[in-house]
Amino acid sequence: MYKVLISDPLSEYGIQRLLEADDVVVERKVGLKENELIEIIGEYDALLVRSQTKVTAKVIEAGTKLKAIGRAGVGVDNIDLKAATRAGVVVINAPDGNTISTAEHSFAMLMALARNIGQAHASTKNGEWKRKDFVGVELNKKTLGIIGLGRIGGEVAKRAKAFNMNVIAYDPFLTEDRAKKLGVQFGTFEDVITKADFITLHTPLTKDTKYIINSNQFAKMKDGVRIINCARGGLINEKALYEAIITGKVAGAALDVFEQEPPVENPLFNLPQVLVTPHLGASTIEAQENVAIDVSEEILHILRGKAFKNAVNLPSIPSEVMQKVEPFFNLAEKLGKFVAQTSVGALQEILVTYSGELTQVDTSPLTRSLLKGVLSYHLGVGEVNYVNAPHLAEMRHITVTEQKSSSNKGFTNLITVTLKTNQETKSVAGTLLNGYGARIVKIDQYTIDASPEGHLILIHHHDRPGAIGRVGTLLGKNDVNIAAMQVGRKDVGGDAIMLLTVDKQVSPDVLDELGELHEIHSVTEVDL
């Protein structure tokens, strides 16, 4: 018999599978303090929590029988993942349980925004009858722009099409073929913000999506556009949104998430054109049940030795394999991050080639690490881990191929990543050098020797006298110090690359200025 402890309130219906299992005993003890949990956790094979229980390293250390910890929800900030991994305890979550709930809330906000329902409700309950003040717009034949066509964005698209809306979508993983299958128009980010009557956001918050909607984007939008954000606070620059509403550029906004939660003295709350809710995207009875159902089923699979999919920590790797591949984890992830940031277009294929001594070991853990690096750039660090990376790639129809080559290019070990998008093919190769650590040794066809660390600038340029000097002068003029520089070229006077390591992040204005130099073909900032 397996013993399962539930230490936070969970839906009775959601844990029904566990309650009905013949080989499981379920005990519910809610509100335990850390010392109380430590005293009893040694009796249990699995622990189920929401966000209240803090599963610390001490708790995990005391859980000598623990095989799994389940989080009925997405975030696992309350669980010490490193401690769980060290102890061989699988941590799982329920990332899909709130998909429908959030999609429906987004569409409810869209409809309420179109028909001024929130404002009309407040006015009417206040004893007023101002029909002319709340004239709305129809959704029929309007264009909905979706930024982020993952699980939730896809469900919103289905509902919009049922209302006879034209749907145009942008997603870094979206291809024209997949857009056609989903029945939506394939668009660039620029297409979405310039053509849409309504814009809804369904993307994670990353360095590159922070303020993805700002004053520059508002200026390009249609007059009278309406904005919906039920994804993450910080995707929209709230000050820019306020100004866009005041000037009439934006007719209204519906917001479920904010940069600061709970919001304090947010000026958007003073605008009648703004509809707000307190982060209710996943707040439905069904969503709470679904996350409990999902995590309960996963716990059963783990206890019974069956396959499971929603683990968020590093899977168990035999010690002899770990000893050989562990030094390469950081290199693999950095190569993935590098090639993701230097490529343009919707990702379609990833080819990973291992050469040299790496051909003699199981490299699948390294491929997971590399995938984590590629996908986390687009989806956010918190959304991607070593376990779910292959699943996320499969969901986005990305082909991942791993191969081993006898050709080691003169290196004891070599990892080469080739990434194909719908616009181009990019590759990067790296190795570990004794005394030097991780090194990037090739970018596309250019041989180079650089450390994959810190703030980098990759410049494609024409190999002419003075080109390097002009780059250095411009950066110096803008108080940017170059810590290291590597240059690669094929032929004298032909195309070449510079890879600069700089002491701080470079502003977009300086990058644009670099791109305007005569010899420069392209400038790409890479943050590792």
Image: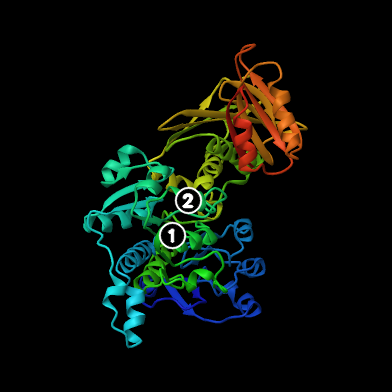
Earlier along the polypeptide chain: callout 2 or callout 1? Answer: 1
Residue name at image x 62 percent, y 37 percent: 511
Q: Residues within 10 Å of mark 2 (few under 14, many from 20)?
A: many
- Which x, y percent locates residue 1? 45, 71
Q: Position of residue 461 (x, y in %)?
A: 61, 23
Given residues 87 and 285, the one toward you in this image is: 285
Q: Look at 48% across and 53% down and name the residue there.
A: 213
Choose mark 2 or mark 1, whichever is in front.
Answer: 1
At label 1, counting other C-alpha atoms closer than 10 Å, the crowd grade (few under 14, some 14-19, many 20 or more) is some
Query: What amino acid type is highlighted by mark number 2?
Result: Asn
Reading the image, the residue beneath label 1 is 95
Using the image, determine if residue 305 lies above or below residue 432.
Answer: below
Quarter in which the C terminus is drawn: top right
Q: Up-down: is 57 above or below 473?
A: below
**Who is closer to the viewer here, 177 or 80?**
177
Q: Is residue 347 left or right of residue 467?
A: left
Residue 331 in view (yes/no): no
* Viewer-nearest residue: 333 or 37: 333
Q: Is residue 141 left or right of residue 412?
A: left
Q: Amino acid at mark 1?
A: Pro
The image's mark for residue 236 is: none
Q: Is disc 2 placed on a helix, strand or loop?
A: loop
User: Residue 388's mark?
Assistant: 2
**From the viewer's perspective, is 218 left or right of 78?**
left
Tag 1 secondary structure: loop
**Label 2, label 1: how many angstroms apart (C-alpha)?**
10 Å
Q: Residue furthest top?
A: 492
Q: Position of residue 428 (x, y in %)?
A: 57, 29
Q: Is residue 121 above or below residue 453?
A: below
Are circles 2 and 1 on residues that touch, CB within 8 Å? yes
In the rendered image, residue 159, in percent from the top left (x then y), is placed at 27, 58
